[in-house]
Image (cartoon, helix red, strand yellow):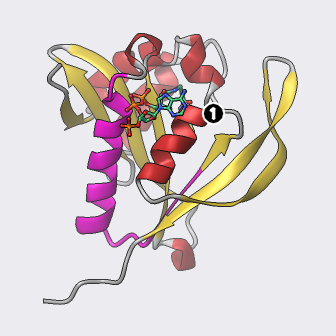
Amino acid sequence: MDIVIRRAEPRDYESIWRTFQDEGVYSGTLQTPFVSQERWMKILSEGADSNYILLACCGDEVLGHGGLHPIGKAARRAHAMGLGLVVRDAWQGKGVGNALMAALVDLADNWLPVIRLELTVYTDNERAIALYRKFGFEMEGTHRCYALRAGRYIDAYAMARLKSKPVAV
Ligand SMILES: CC(C)(COP(=O)(O)OP(=O)(O)OC[C@H]1O[C@@H](n2cnc3c(N)ncnc32)[C@H](O)[C@@H]1OP(=O)(O)O)[C@@H](O)C(=O)NCCC(=O)NCCS
């Protein structure tokens, strides 16, 4: 399967909305069922300069997406970005997450002045944890009862990855 990674454009809101229709996708994130198309329309059109949302595509089909997002507005945290990643239920376990992570980490390491990438992941999400570790993320702690999922409060790990030393010419 040829996976092409490209930047999400405002017109892609429907594909992203469709991805979040999958139960495995919204369950693994902080999204709720009944995701709003309008919300994604706004994020893609208004946040284009600050959010780097990349799509993994096979032909015309969008298989999943991942993003780097600013963390608040504090200048002293400008070196950090949040990372999010989702792959449609039918395409999980086929290397799509790997391809998106490689592109996001390359963007952060080589093209953006970002030193720290951070994320949260539910403690039972073994596939995601394995993928994040593979790309250099380390555990920093556990958020207890972090989020409500299908009627139960579940824990999440805080994971982060620090860029190795800056390379001077
Ligand atoms: C987590 C997620 C993004 C991973 O993407 P993916 O396309 O399914 O993952 P890949 O096929 O690229 O595989 C990633 C790695 O996990 C490993 N893996 C797969 N299944 C696994 C499992 N059950 N347990 C542990 N590791 C597993 C694979 O071996 C692979 O590593 P490798 O390339 O060294 O072999 C995807 O499954 C997903 O979107 N899940 C639902 C939403 C979600 O949980 N998002 C993450 C929120 S923090």
Q: Which residues are magenta?
A: 94-119
Q: Is residue 132 above or below residue 128?
A: below
Residue depicted at 71% across the width and 40% down the height = 123
Q: Position of residue 110 (x, y in %)?
A: 23, 67
**Quarter where residue 164 is shown:** bottom left
Q: Amino acid at mark 1?
A: Asn
Is residue 99 highlighted in magenta?
Answer: yes
**Looking at mark 1, is its residue's CB closer than 8 Å to ligand 1?**
yes
* Viewer can see residue 83: no
Residue depicted at 67% across the width and 55% down the height = 158
Q: Secondary structure at mark 1?
A: loop
Instruction: Give the camera-side residue of 24 and 93.
Output: 93
Where does label 1 land, which residue?
125
Q: Is residue 151 above or below residue 90?
A: below
Horizontally, residue 125 falls left or right of residue 77, namely right
**Quarter where residue 12 is shown:** top left
Density class for disc 1 (Cα within 10 Å; few <14, some 14-19, many ≥20) is few
Q: Position of residue 4 (x, y in %)?
A: 17, 30
Is residue 97 highlighted in magenta?
Answer: yes
Q: Position of residue 69 (x, y in %)?
A: 46, 52
Q: Quadrant of the C terminus?
A: bottom left
Residue depicted at 77% across the width and 53% down the height = 142
Residue depicted at 54% across the width and 21% down the height = 25
Q: Position of residue 166 (x, y in %)?
A: 30, 83
Callout count:
1
Q: Quadrant of the N terminus?
A: top left
Instruction: Give the camera-side residue of 21 and 104.
Output: 104
